[in-house]
Image: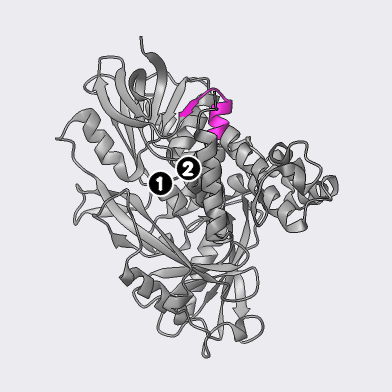
Amino acid sequence: MSETYDLLVVGGGINGAGIARDAAGRGMSVLLVEKDDLASHTSSASTKLVHGGLRYLEQFEFRLVGESLREREVLLANAPHIIWPLRFVLPHFKGMRPKWMLRIGLAIYDRLGGKKTLPGSHKVNLRIAPHQSILQDGIKSGFEYADCWVEDSRLVVLTAMDAEARGATVLTRTECTGLERHADSWTATLKDDAGDRTVTARCVVNAAGPWVDSVAKTALGAGTPAHLRLVKGSHIIVPRAYPGDHAYIFQQPDKRIVFAIPYERDYTLIGTTDMLYEGDLDRVEISAEERTYLREAATRYFRSGVTEEDIVHTYAGVRPLYEDKAASNSTVTRDYVFEVDSEGGAPILSVYGGKITTYRKLAEHALEKLASHMPVPGRSWTADAPLPGGDMADRDFAKFLWQASERHPWLPPETVLRLARAYGTRLDMVIGGAGSLEELGEHFGGDLYEAELAYLVDHEYARSAQDVLWRRSKLGLHLSEDACAQVGQWFDRRSQPPAP
């Protein structure tokens, strides 16, 4: 007899993890399945921001911007280790949006979110340090405002961990290959390394991101109308382009904007693009055209320019936007949209769109939608619930970091900072009872030791070097090729059965 759940959530990105967490916390039985690793696609390919979306004001997405700004405050409070404030400098460039438009937009941005902890916007003189030596001649003034940075992949993993802690079952490398509808349930076929098995669920939540229409068609048939506009966003990473801990937001002649953000201590992240995508969803890569666009976008502002040879790494992801084909001229929104189908029996809810900043609120709204089609117990609860590692006193990361340094004086300061940022109050679980670097086990290079790898396998669903080096962390940027290969060999040894 197959296992039975209230919810089967298909998709281990930020939306799927958020819905699974919220539902599990209300007492529902939840199974989350992801065909690859958690956050292995769109949710790890973002610009790493928790923000209102200043540019969405031009598209009159006031509801989305307001909700995003309010959620920015909630997430900052609940995950102060992986989310922190970041200042953005918006230069005024002749021929782009006029100053009055920027000033009005920022004034609206300051007020839409209601109560806030981050400072409001203000004018800034770009003819003085540090900006004078960074930006091109002729760029004299601009504005400064605040949003937040987020470790996007870690946000997904921590959300899934909390879902599991509250009773959900989380299965990675498990694909939903079949969905059969009955009057009051679904039978799902799941495929993993061990083969096929079936489970039963009273409802299916289709949070498969770019694959959302594919899963919907598996469940409902080929006649399902598609509402998906797939848009690729790509980023380049270059050596640190300027000093300082502030980011820049650069206007472009095509009316788009490009961010330049301090990244991983030694680098600058530049992105993103916005191109329709029709290729292989499992192999999304930056194009030569996008590389050129981002280099030219930054060079238009940076005194030093950005060359092709400067690019040390790239990444790309596909955003699943909702297209309302019933509207005149077909409109595409950056907001999230739900489609619930319950006419043929048990309900299925499909999630279109969404962004990292609003994932928690999206989950609340998804369960509100489902409440009309099935029993959904409890009330919304996630607004005041810290994510794993975020339960530090007064949500004060600086105080926590100082205390961690005092407890572990043998850890180099940069290692304490990295571990505290990644794991928060779970830092002591990562290092265990170690009292020296040698007691952390095998050293792979930099500040990566075996104790951290073991923790990631035991508690954070990591099953490969890629999971660790490019999602649970960005250590792949800092370690040599030999060191990265050594991490892969460690996983190979761990996966081998013990000798008889």
Question: Residue sitting at 57 percent across and 51 percent down?
Answer: 473
Image quarter of the C terminus? top right
Front residue of 380 and 40: 40
Q: Is residue 53 left or right of residue 447?
A: left
Tell me the magenta residue range.
160-170
Front residue of 291 and 147: 291
Crowding around mark 2 (Cα neighbors within 10 Å: few <14, some 14 to 19, many 20+) is many
Residue 242 horizontal/vertical position (percent) = 60, 76
- List the residue tagged with mark 2: 359
| 305 relative to 226, above or below | below
Please tell me whether mark 1 sits on a helix, a strand or a loop: loop
**Residue at the farthest top position:** 1
Q: Amino acid at mark 1?
A: Gly
Front residue of 246 and 139: 246
- List the residue tagged with mark 1: 354
On the image, which quarter does residue 267 sit in? bottom right
Question: Residue sitting at 59 percent across and 33 percent down?
Answer: 458
Find out whether the residues at labels 2 and 1 contact each other: C-beta distance under 8 Å. Answer: yes
Image quarter of the N terminus? top left
